[in-house]
Image (cartoon, rainbow, N blue to C red):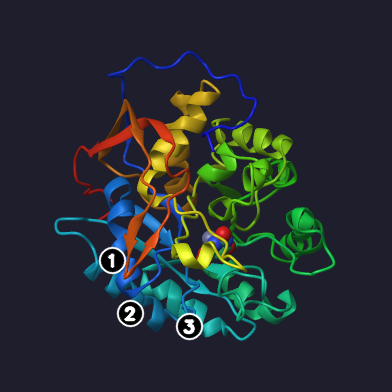
Amino acid sequence: MPLLAHHVPRPAQTPAGTTLVIDRPDDWHLHLRDGEELKAVLPHTAAQFHRAIIMPNLKPPVTTTALALAYRKRILEARPAGSDFDPLMTLYLTDNTPADEIHRAKASGVVHAVKLYPAGATTNSDSGVTDLKHTYKALEAMQEAGMVLAIHGEVTDRDIDVFDREKVFIDEKLIPLRRDFPALRVVFEHITTKDAADYVATAEGEIAATITAHHLLYNRNALFQGGIRPHYYCLPVLKRELHRQSLLEAATSGKPRYFLGTDSAPHAMGDKESDCGCAGCYTALHALELYATAFEAVGRLDRLEGFASHFGPDFYRLPRNAGKVRLHRQDWSIPTALPYGDRIVVPLAHGETLGWRFEASLQTNDASR
Ligand code: DOR
Ligand code: ZN
């Protein structure tokens, strides 16, 4: 499936040899898994990004500060030699998260957000929230402490069409929630619709959204191009073209409420190419190249740096990175398989040709140490 299988007019190609240098970026939404799988995927993210917000949907989920600290230690130990990758931890919100746990998380200095998964919304979300009312004590503590709530914004009601679940979540859950907690800092994760982009643009209070590269590059046709394509299946699922256009407009608008979050979510090939395939696209290998491709397609490479490197740390109240990274114009073929523990993982757009290549991280970071 060609990258950019859609109707955006492609600007004249940047000439071969051109380089793109931007401030060192961070990934504000990432799944790193654990154990041997963690060791397999972490080098890809650590090569391109200085920091990442680490999703807590392990089995069992990271529900306490103690678990987050232990997971952080395993991530630090799995870093490639010489890497200064800095994992920003999150807690998994449940119906029973006590206010105390939020205070412990805040005091730890290493937990930067609490993740809301509506129960059953996605991979390992069975312990997620069944009713937002059950979380009000924890949300009150978060609002008070200035802790970010990162939201998987989909309702889980099986009667709601899967393509409508984000919009219904905004109307029925997010708006009432933010009315009750107007000072709560919210990141609406991996937005996939015009409705979400528009809501974030105009909503009052401290709210931002992350946007994945795959939702900028593909619409839902990608799932069915010549047959069913499990490696393009993620949640929230790809939407129709008008939504993709709207996300591209938001991401390349230069508005600080939208920033980079890959939602790179590896699954072993057999678990995706299956009778009931897992949701998640693996993009850590080529994240910046995918984003550069999307931005270039609308003639907005000049806006990539704000989206990838500035607006995320500004929202999370962290310093911007000091270093730079360089990409250069070069065609290369995305591999069809990568080692993943004792199995393999298939990266997004495997076998396709990318026109940008990540080259180097130009200096180490000391601003956030
Ligand atoms: O596609 C997805 N994969 N969406 C999620 O929300 C979770 C993720 C995963 O953990 O595999
Ligand atoms: Zn995710």
Percent position of residue 167, x then y? 77, 53
Q: CA distance from mark 2 to mark 3?
A: 13 Å
Callout 2: 10 Å neighbours few (<14), some, many (20+)?
Answer: few
Q: Residue at x 83, y 63 (%)?
A: 160
Callout 3: 10 Å neighbours few (<14), some, many (20+)?
Answer: few
Do tag 3 and tag 1 residues touch (Cβ < 8 Å)?
no
Residue where numbered disc 1 is placed: 39
Earlier-in-chain disc, 3 versus 1: 1
Residue at the far left: name it: 82
Q: CA distance from mark 3 to mark 1?
A: 19 Å
Residue sitting nearer the eye, 175 or 70: 70
Q: Which mark identifies residue 60?
A: 3
Image quadrant of ligand 1 equals bottom right
Q: Amino acid at mark 1?
A: Lys
Q: Is residue 75 above or below residue 52?
A: below
Earlier-in-chain disc, 2 versus 1: 1
Q: Quadrant of the C terminus?
A: bottom left
Residue where numbered disc 2 is placed: 70
Q: Amino acid at mark 2?
A: Ala
Q: Amino acid at mark 3?
A: Pro
Which secondary structure lies at badge 1? helix
Residue 124 lies left or right of residue 163; in this view the side is left
Residue 37 lies left or right of residue 100; in this view the side is left
Q: Residue at x 59, y 49 (%)?
A: 208
Q: CA distance from mark 2 to mark 1?
A: 16 Å
Percent position of residue 214, x then y? 54, 44
Q: Is residue 284 above or below residue 240?
A: below
Q: Residue at x 45, y 25 (%)?
A: 301
Which secondary structure lies at badge 3? loop
